Amino acid sequence: MTLMRRYQRGQRLVVDYAIGLAILGLVPMLLTPSLVIAAALLLTMIWHVGKCWQFAISINPITIGGEVLNVLGALAVATLTWLILVVLGVSIPLVDHFSTSGALMSGTWTFGAAVNQFFFLGFIRRRSREYAVGSHE
């Protein structure tokens, strides 16, 4: 499977999970159960995206630091989406009912893109090491 196909497959998985979590946000229930289910689905998403990349990870300070910043960015995007929809709901009726759904979708999409990138970088690093070892023989 080519790199492009793997990357697109990972992105499709992320979009599927983002849509699923957006639907979860539309279900009228308490916030805590929704967030627990969302966390479980996010862990499942990490597993499936990692499986797509053969769980190739790169452990170095720059990659880890970048991933931490990406996760913080995903939290910021989700929080801002939620806040914007709640504030809009003050003047536009019913918009605030979509705040949890919007936050879950935007946060999942951003977080999933970061996870896909993390495994992609690990995969590239693994392949370059395999290529370097194979070319010296």
Image (tube, rainbow, N blue to C red):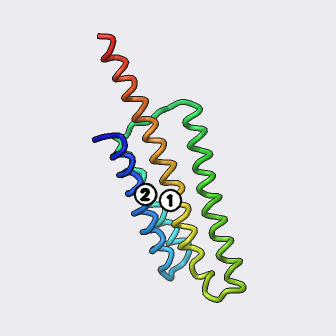
Q: Residue at x 58, y 50 (%)?
A: 71
Q: Please tell me the numbered disc located at residue 121.
A: none
Give the mark count: 2
Say whether disc 1 or disc 2 marks the residue closer to the N-terminus: 2
Q: In the orientation shown, which residue stands out farthest toward the top?
A: 137
Indicate whether 16 appears above or below 43.
below
Q: Is residue 37 left or right of residue 100?
A: left
For residue 84, which quarter of the picture?
Answer: bottom right
Residue 4: x and y, percent?
Answer: 37, 44
Residue 121: x and y, percent?
Answer: 46, 36
Residue 9: x and y, percent?
Answer: 35, 52
Q: Amino acid at mark 1?
A: Trp
Q: Residue at x 71, y 84 (%)?
A: 90
Q: Are marks 1 and 2 in contact (CB under 8 Å)?
A: yes
Q: Please, what secondary structure does the residue beneath circle 1 have?
A: helix
Mark 1 neighbour class, 10 Å CA radius: few under 14, some 14 to 19, many 20 or more: many
Q: Amino acid at mark 2?
A: Val
Q: Residue at x 29, y 10 (%)?
A: 137
Q: List the residue tagged with mark 1.
A: 109
**Can residue 44 be seen?**
no
Q: Is residue 48 left or right of residue 26?
A: left
Q: In the orientation shown, which residue stands out farthest toward the bottom?
A: 93
Mark 2 neighbour class, 10 Å CA radius: few under 14, some 14 to 19, many 20 or more: many
Q: Is residue 131 left or right of residue 46?
A: left
Q: Residue at x 63, y 70 (%)?
A: 82
Q: Please, what secondary structure does the residue beneath circle 2 have?
A: helix
**Can residue 75 be seen?**
yes
Indicate whether 132 appears above or below 113.
above
Quadrant of the image containing the N terminus: top left
Q: Please tell me the numbered disc located at residue 14.
A: 2
Indicate whether 41 appears above or below 116.
below
